[in-house]
Amino acid sequence: MLMQEDNETLTRVGRGTPMGEMMRRYWVPALFAWELPEPDCPPVEVRLLGEDLVAFRQTDGRVGVVDQRCPHRSASLFWGRVEENGLRCVYHGWKYDTDGYCVDMPSEPDATNFKHKVRLTSYPTVEAGGVVWAYMGPPEKQPPPPLFEWTRAPETHRGMTKVLQETNWLQALEGGIDTVHSNFLHYGKPASGGLSDEIGQTRQRALGFSKAALVEVEPTDYGYTYAGLRALPDGGYFVRGYHWVMPWYQLRGYSLDTPKPTVHGHMWVPVDDGHTMVYNYIYTYGSEALSEDQRLLVGTGNQFGVDIDVENGFRSIRNRSNRYMIDRLVQKTRTFTGIEGTNTQDRAVQESMGGIVDRSYERLGTTDRAIIMSRRMLLQAVKDTQAGGDPPGVTDSYYKLRAVEQLIGEGENWLEAMRPRLFQEPEAITAI
């Protein structure tokens, strides 16, 4: 159960809200780099944390993320022309660079030209891992660039998509960090990710044998690392190790000792209070490249063109309007839900809760430890930020993280057993 006041704090993300101000202290995934494929290409509309913005790639290749409204008469700069290192409004020709400065005001006579006094809101950007990131917080608090291990992997070794979810960001996050629902919601779905049959069978044996996993959470300076421990019928535990990097990043283990070990994860980025852009990724830190199916995220519910309509705002093809194309016969005979695609199943149940969940209604158990801990840490981070401090996860300590799966014996401590693989030294990942 969560008090309504705390629920409001956690779910409202607009400028001036406690959570919104805290979130603006991080690099925010804004769009894919390929959405701005070349210099002077058409601009792209972006909505982040309740703000309507425009992204454009100017002539020198730099990407700008700026307020959508022209400061002159509030016309949308989405209709603008990108030319000669700037974005020109089509209404009266005023032109802006990536820093938001007005560099040309052709509609005003020279005697009264005041372009040097006009600047629209703009945000610093960085490109990493095929993503354009924007920093929307105080300039003096700008953190190091978001160099997760997957951002350093070559394109042959990673895949990424995104999909619009019609819920508040918090229920998307909480659905993602809930490890126990896999035993039920995703039951019957064959193991994916290109792993060997032996590994897939080990995971399935654990999921089938241990319905009520043990969930353990260890706080860190970036958020926490956590694990779902599932007993095996012949002794020991199958452990899936995760990291939650505040506020919206997850690294999920999906490998044992294979020639092509993979890590999966999500970034649950608030569009506004009622919508979330969910970035989905996979990468391998092995020498062998991912297969084409892996890079395309086939079978996850996150494949472009099959599960996601790219031309329609990255909306899910299976959605509430068509009841996620549920097949009740398949539900009776093959899968727990009858809905195709692992993450489509997630969207179905999370969107069924409504735009923003009333958490005063819920009753949580011991397997909800990761969810309980994330709420506490987010609320504390808000308080720390309001008091002038820094929230967790704004340093580069997450650069060394890697999520893994592992078998451990009876009485063995999962964190100590997995620590060398969960926390890689920075030198170990720079060669990717």
Image (tube, grey):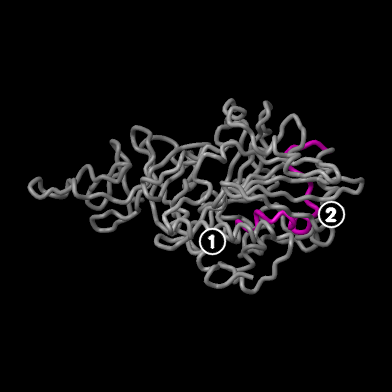
Residue at 38% of width from left, 34% of height from top? 61
**Label whose residue precedes the other's in the sequence (2 or 1):** 2
Q: Position of residue 366 (x, y in %)?
A: 74, 62
Residue 43 in sight here: no
Figure quadrant of the C terminus: top right
Cα distance in 3D space between marks 2 and 1:
32 Å
Badge number at residue 5: none
What secondary structure is the magenta-colored segment mainly? loop
Q: Amino acid at mark 2?
A: Ser
Mark 2–mark 1 CB contact (< 8 Å): no
Q: Is residue 379 left or right of residue 55?
A: right
Q: Is residue 422 left or right of residue 144?
A: right
Residue 218 in sight here: yes
Q: Amino acid at mark 1?
A: Leu
Badge number at residue 210: 2
- Was residue 181 drawn as part of the magenta stretch in this picture? yes
Instruction: Please provide the residue range marked out in magenta.
Output: 173-197
Q: Position of residue 245 (x, y in %)?
A: 58, 47
Instruction: Kindly identify which residue carries mark 1.
Output: 379
The answer to whether 7 is drawn above or below residue 213 in the figure is below
